[in-house]
């Protein structure tokens, strides 16, 4: 037996060349269709291999092995003919073993094994969790109208620090005895000068097996153009499948093919292209096909909705790179590793480019139509959910984002001379480049929101809009520990002060003029407080208050403060200013007109009526008509 377990044919006795030729020709007859290497009786296979060895030895040393009854030339011709017959037969046997002796398995059933060594936190990468934007509609031509609200952004994950080639899961593609027979045949074919044919047969048979695994894993044959023409929704689903398939292909399929090739060919020598040529012949085309998909993604158009799937792709290839280096370790396969490394580099560059595209898109999102009711703008929801997801990829992005926002991006963006935002951009010395970019995105979002607030004709609604949106920004930052750490508490305090200032400005714009109706000035008819009041002035004050409050109630009930706690806090703040002022005014002056004819036209509401009416404010719907309670 040889080192691989295959049968080594002992040297045939001198003068046995003719017997060896007869043995070869015996298996060339039409009646001998059964395989020689059938995994059962070994005697036929051993005799055939001994005959091949004898003929090869005679060809190498014709004088020593030539029969005295034949000339050396006729002996050489007969031996050459016999060796051709033998090689044709061994080629068939080689192919038969490769096709018929394979261990049956379903690659799908082994896919989970390929991820055993992955950090368990990576399992969330492939699980969608819904859309990042729960807003409806957007301005035409805006960032949101570009398809950016796709589910590609709707999944959360935790980073993986896995870096090890221990994840490789080799499986036995053929039984040990079949591998031993393959090695014995390959050794004879290479020794006889048929190494190229041996490699071609091997590659052809194993390519078919690899192709079958690819089909089972859903790896499609797509050109770069095919990939780039796909709609993003379809493409992101293919990326999820590709990540799963790539792990299985590298860690199971390619690794097992490498092992089989080593078992059959390693150390034999004499193979055209080196001992790795059969492996290269088998998997190189498949590997190029596999990584061609990722390459197409890496050079595709950069748009914000692609960021998270590209990050998933980057992390997957980064995670696989040590395994790729292990499997494709020979010179003939180094181009596969080089391709994967270059794709990884391009994906990293794509991530940086997409972040820049997002900044420009937020800065330039057009301000055309104000959102009804001053509620949270779709852009605000989109951007804040987007950067919350960015913070989930913190570890990867800290490695990839190495520069801070450029001076040009802070002023005029891509268009020279275009006026950029004049904003205060806090930039602590210890802030990472990633944190600097995220802070800058929030800064330009607030700048954009201030422009959108100017679209409202009612200044009170403009302030309410800013209050809602800045509060949402603060809420999202506080709700993500990773994002809060990146943004920092100092800037968070500034944003908190900003939305509180907007709330105060709203109250001033709305309620100062209403409270002005409840002033004492002009009601008293003389300089003495006790000398009497002007009933006509008093009636006018009540009438003006009622009209103003009715209008505000009818209007601001349709405005919306979507955050329940903020809505209730705003109502309480309003009631703390309005109700005591109205109670005091009513207490001082109601008795002057309550007994007059049509007094209810002036004293229209009790304090309790106003308090009940305030519960209608900021609900986003038309209120029911106010009903008057009987005052005590």
Image (spheres, rainbow, N blue to C red):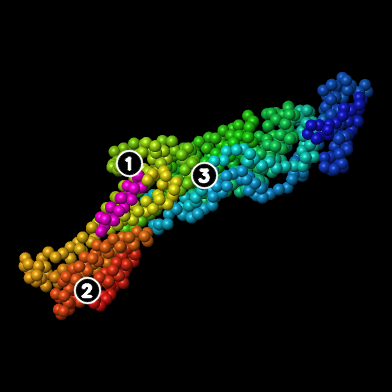
Q: Provide the residue designation for mark 2.
A: 604
First in sequence: mark 1 vs mark 3: 3
Specify the quadrant that holds the C terminus. bottom left
Kindly indicate whether the residue at mark 2 contacts the one at mark 3 (C-beta within 8 angstroms).
Answer: no
| x 59%, y 32%: residue | 335
Is residue 342 visible in the rendered image? The answer is yes
Q: Is residue 608 left or right of residue 382?
A: left
User: Is 591 covered by the magenta stretch?
Assistant: no
Rendered location of residue 575, percent (x, y): 27, 64
- Which range is magenta? 490-507
Secondary structure of the residue carrying numbered label 3: loop
First in sequence: mark 3 vs mark 2: 3
Rendered location of residue 286, percent (x, y): 62, 40
First in sequence: mark 1 vs mark 2: 1
Q: Provide the residue designation for mark 3.
A: 159
Quarter location, residue 205: top right
Rendered location of residue 340, percent (x, y): 56, 36
Quarter location, residue 537: bottom left
Q: Provide the residue designation for mark 1.
A: 425
């Amino acid at each position: 037996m040889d080192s691989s377990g295959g049968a080594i044919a002992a040297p045939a006795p001198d003068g046995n060349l003719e017997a060896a030729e007869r043995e070869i020709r015996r298996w060339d007859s039409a009646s001998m269709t059964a395989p020689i290497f059938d995994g059962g009786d070994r005697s036929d296979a051993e005799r055939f291999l001994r005959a091949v060895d004898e003929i090869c030895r005679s060809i190498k040393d014709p004088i020593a092995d030539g029969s005295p009854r034949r000339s050396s030339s006729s002996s050489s011709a007969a031996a050459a003919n016999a060796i051709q017959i033998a090689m044709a037969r061994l080629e068939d046997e080689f192919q038969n073993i490769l096709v018929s002796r394979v261990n049956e398995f379903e690659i799908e059933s082994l896919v989970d094994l390929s991820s055993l060594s992955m950090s368990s936190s990576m399992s969330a990468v492939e699980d969608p969790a819904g859309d990042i934007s729960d807003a409806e509609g957007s301005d035409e031509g805006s960032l949101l109208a570009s398809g950016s609200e796709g589910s590609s952004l709707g999944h959360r994950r935790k980073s993986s620090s896995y870096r090890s080639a221990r994840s490789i899961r080799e499986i036995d593609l053929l039984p040990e005895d079949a591998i031993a027979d393959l090695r014995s045949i390959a050794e004879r074919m290479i020794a006889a000068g048929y190494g190229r044919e041996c490699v071609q047969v091997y590659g052809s048979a194993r390519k078919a097996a690899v192709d079958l695994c690819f089909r089972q894993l859903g790896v499609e044959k797509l050109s770069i153009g095919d990939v780039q023409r796909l709609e993003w929704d379809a493409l992101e689903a293919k990326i999820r499948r590709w990540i799963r398939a790539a792990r299985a292909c590298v860690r199971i399929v390619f690794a097992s093919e490498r092992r089989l090739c080593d078992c059959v060919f390693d150390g034999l020598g004499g193979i055209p292209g080196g001992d790795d040529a059969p492996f290269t012949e088998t998997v190189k085309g498949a590997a190029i096909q596999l990584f061609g998909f990722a390459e197409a993604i890496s050079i595709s158009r950069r748009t914000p909705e692609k960021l998270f799937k590209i990050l998933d792709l980057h992390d997957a290839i980064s995670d696989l790179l040590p395994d790729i280096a292990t499997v494709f370790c020979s010179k003939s396969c180094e181009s596969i590793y080089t391709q994967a490394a270059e794709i990884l580099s391009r994906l990293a560059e794509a991530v940086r480019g997409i972040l820049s595209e997002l900044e420009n898109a937020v800065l330039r999102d057009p301000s055309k139509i104000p959102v009804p009711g001053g509620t949270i703008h779709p852009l605000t929801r989109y951007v804040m959910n987007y950067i919350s997801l960015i913070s989930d990829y913190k570890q990867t992005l800290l490695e990839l984002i190495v520069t801070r926002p450029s001076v040009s991006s802070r002023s005029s963006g891509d268009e020279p001379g275009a006026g950029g935002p004049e904003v205060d951009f806090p930039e602590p010395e210890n802030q990472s480049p990633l944190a600097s970019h995220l802070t800058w995105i929030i800064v330009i979002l607030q700048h954009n929101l201030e422009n959108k607030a100017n679209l409202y004709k009612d200044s009170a609604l403009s302030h309410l809009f800013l209050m809602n949106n800045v509060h949402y920004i603060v809420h999202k930052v506080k709700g993500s520990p990773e994002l809060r750490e990146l943004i920092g508490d100092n800037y968070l305090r500034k944003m908190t002060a900003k939305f509180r200032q907007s709330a105060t400005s709203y109250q001033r714009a709305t309620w100062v003029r209403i409270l002005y109706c409840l002033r004492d000035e002009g009601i008293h008819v003389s300089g003495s407080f006790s000398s009497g009041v002007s009933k006509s002035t008093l009636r006018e004050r009540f009438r003006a208050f009622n009209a103003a409050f009715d209008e505000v109630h009818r209007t601001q009930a349709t405005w919306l403060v979507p955050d329940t706690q903020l809505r209730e806090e705003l109502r309480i703040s309003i009631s703390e200013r309005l109700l005591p002022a109205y109670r005091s005014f009513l207490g001082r002056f109601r008795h002057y007109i309550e007994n007059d004819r049509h007094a209810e036209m002036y004293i229209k509401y009790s304090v309790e009526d106003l308090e009940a009416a305030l519960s209608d404010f900021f609900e986003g719907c038309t209120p029911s008509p106010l009903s008057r309670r009987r005052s005590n």
